[in-house]
Image (cartoon, rainbow, N blue to C red):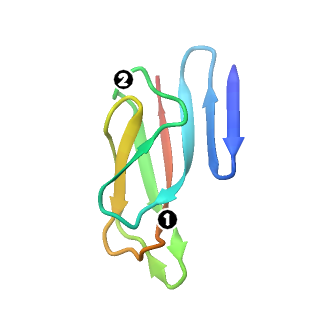
């Protein structure tokens, strides 16, 4: 590992070969929100996963995340409350 960073629930790790892992918690209240990565990728050939988080008595389901650019991803959930959150993880070069 050559570089690490963490602040609250947000984090990333960059390895000496250029591989990046990163993640965090973001709002899932909208069905289409764009979030900027903590560490940009070289291109859009990365993997991104999303998982809903419990929000009081509600689940924000389904949570989804898709590559937008090398520096951001689009995410959201349908049926969540206005304070719904989702956990995300992305990896690639």
Of residues 91 and 37, the one nearer the viewer is 37
Measured as percent of width and height from the top left, residue 10 is found at 61, 46
Element type where label 1 sits in the image: strand
Horizontal side, residue 63 vs residue 51: left or right = left
Residue displayed at 48% across by 72% down: 83
Measured as percent of width and height from the top left, residue 21 is found at 56, 34
Element type where label 2 sits in the image: loop
Q: Please tell me whether residue 55 is drawn above or below residue 15 in the rendered image.
A: below
* Residue 6, image quadrant: top right
Q: Please tell me whether residue 66 is drawn above or below residue 78 in the rendered image.
A: above
Q: Visible in this render: residue 17?
A: yes
Find disc 1 in the rendering and name its residue: 85
Q: CA distance from mark 2 to mark 1?
A: 26 Å
Q: For mark 1, does the 10 Å Cα neighbourhood hold few (<14), some (14 to 19), or many (20 or more) residues?
A: many
Measured as percent of width and height from the top left, residue 19 is found at 54, 23
Q: Residue furthest top?
A: 17
Quarter that holds the N terminus: top right
Q: Residue furthest bottom?
A: 57
Of residues 15 and 12, the one nearer the viewer is 12
Find disc 2 in the rendering and name its residue: 43
Q: Visible in this render: residue 64?
A: no
Q: Which mark is residue 41?
A: none
């Amino acid at each position: 590992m050559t570089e690490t960073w963490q602040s609250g629930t947000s984090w990333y790790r960059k390895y000496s070969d250029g591989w990046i892992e990163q993640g965090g918690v973001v709002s899932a209240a909208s069905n289409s929100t764009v979030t900027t990565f903590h560490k940009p990728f070289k291109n859009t050939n990365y993997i991104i996963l999303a998982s809903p988080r419990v929000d009081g008595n509600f689940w924000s389901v389904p949570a989804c995340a898709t590559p937008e650019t090398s520096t951001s991803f689009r995410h959201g959930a349908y049926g969540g409350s206005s304070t719904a959150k989702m956990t995300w993880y992305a990896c690639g070069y």
